[in-house]
Structure formats: C-alpha cells, structure tokens
Image: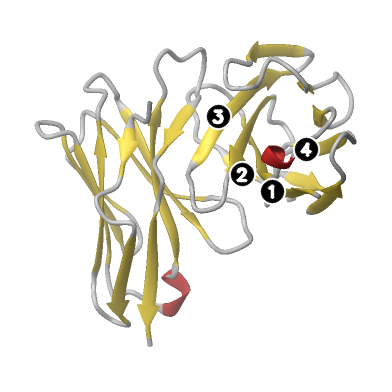
Amino acid sequence: NAGVMQNPRHLVRRRGQEARLRCSPVKGHSHVYWYRQLPEEGLKFMVYLQKENIIDESGMPKERFSAEFPKEGPSILRIQQVVRGDSAAYFCASSPGQAYGYTFGSGTRLTVV
Amino acid sequence: GENVGLHLPTLSVQEGDNSIINCAYSNSASDYFIWYKQESGKGPQFIIDIRSNMDKRQGQRVTVLLNKTVKHLSLQIAATQPGDSAVYFCAEPSSPNTGNQFYFGTGTSLTVIP
C-alpha cells in the first residue's frame, strides 16, 4: 500500500542544467499538487494537476518551470536552466478529490551548484 | 502574503509534559484547517483537521482547538514523547482557490527534552 513516491530523493544540478522531478501519487488518487519548501520556511503551493490537465499553476514561475500529469505514468515537475535560487525541497502530494486532505511524498531535495 | 502564521518559531518541552502550538490565520472565511507534522528529511504528515463548524476535535493524544472570534488555532499534544520532535504546520485553504490548495505557515519547531 505505497504512499506518494517521489524520485530522486536528492538531485544536484549545475546552473543552466535541467531538473526533472517525478511523483507517483497514491494508487487511485487523481489529484496531484506540487509544493516548494525553502530552508526553515513553510510550503508554498506551485501547481495543481489532474490527469492530463493543469488546473491551477498560479504558484509556479512563468518561466523555466513546467508540470505535467500524463494519462499514464508519474507527474513530472521540470525546471529548465536551473539557478541557485531553485535550490529547495520539492514536495508532491495527492488526494482522491478536492474535499480531502493530502498525502505528501518524502520530497526531492534539489541543490544547484 | 501569508494567510497563516505562528506565534512562536521554536518550542522546547520536557518529555511527558503537554505541548501547545499556536497558529493565527487571517481569512475569516476559511472553513477547514489541517495540522501537519514534518520530521527532519521527511514530507509533511497529516495529524488532525477541523472544520469551522467545530470548536474542538480530539485525536490520539492530540487536540485541535479553533477560536473563530480571534482567528486562532492551537494544537495540543498530551504527554509529549521524543518522537513528537518535529516541525508543526497549520494550513488553511488558500484564497482564491480552484480546488484544495492550502497556505502553510512557517512552522513551529518542537523539541522534546528527554
């Protein structure tokens, strides 16, 4: 009975490279959320997706960041041309619907060097 | 800006004592609140939630109190144990909300002293 699976757990990228973060929701959950957490700060909403649809990307920077949740496979958060300010923990959460609380994954810790 | 905030960033308690973690929110229309626990290196873990039609909700060793008059939440942990050491976040639905997004406060770091 796996929870939300995120990989990789740790990711190091040089400035200018691309980062791809993967999230497999709880089986049966069709709602996926991505949050970013800077050191010693709370979680900031980035994007909300349902299968094949982006519902709300208001928390995601307009440039360099994109997200998808295809019909088959995990949700992907993609960061192009990473900069040092992108270094953070990125958490994915899933829920079975809008009226439910989240189940979070363990996060991907991105370090840009 | 932030809709939720916490009164104290850190809290230290003796093992066996009760802990109280406070949270203020600014959106009087918020109707649902969640407390999460985040241990070092892990993702947030759901602890307990409460809807605005309630003043109090109890779980196993935890109680959440909601005071809508002053827009204040508290999380009480009874007989605090070393395993309770973590950062605790309160969260409320963001506004506007297209579906289940939440604002998280900065968090309170709880340290349990054996």
Label 3: few (<14), some (14–19) or many (≥20) C-alpha neighbours in 10 Å: many
In the image, residue A4 lies at what x, y percent? 71, 44
- B29 shown above or below A110: above
Three-letter code for the amino acid on which mark 2 is drawn: Phe
| Point 50% across, 25% down: residue | B101
Q: Which element carries disc 1, helix, strand or loop?
A: loop
Three-letter code for the amino acid on which mark 3 is drawn: Phe
Label 1: few (<14), some (14–19) or many (≥20) C-alpha neighbours in 10 Å: many
In the image, residue B38 lies at what x, y percent? 51, 56
Residue B68 seen: yes
Residues flagged by tags 3 and 1 on a common chain: yes
Q: Quadrant of residue B81?
A: bottom left
Q: Which subunit holds the residue at mark 3?
A: A
Label 2: few (<14), some (14–19) or many (≥20) C-alpha neighbours in 10 Å: many
Three-letter code for the amino acid on which mark 1 is drawn: Gly
Q: Which residue is mark 4?
A: A23
Q: Are marks 2 and 4 in contact (CB under 8 Å)?
A: no
Q: Which residue is mark 2?
A: A104
Q: Which residue is mark 1?
A: A107
Q: Which residue is mark 3?
A: A45
Seen as rendered, the residue at the extreme left is B69
User: How far apart are labels 2 and 4 at the CA level?
Assistant: 10 Å
User: How far apart are labels 4 and 3 at the CA level?
Assistant: 15 Å
User: How far apart are labels 3 and 1 at the CA level?
Assistant: 14 Å
- A109 shown above or below B16: above
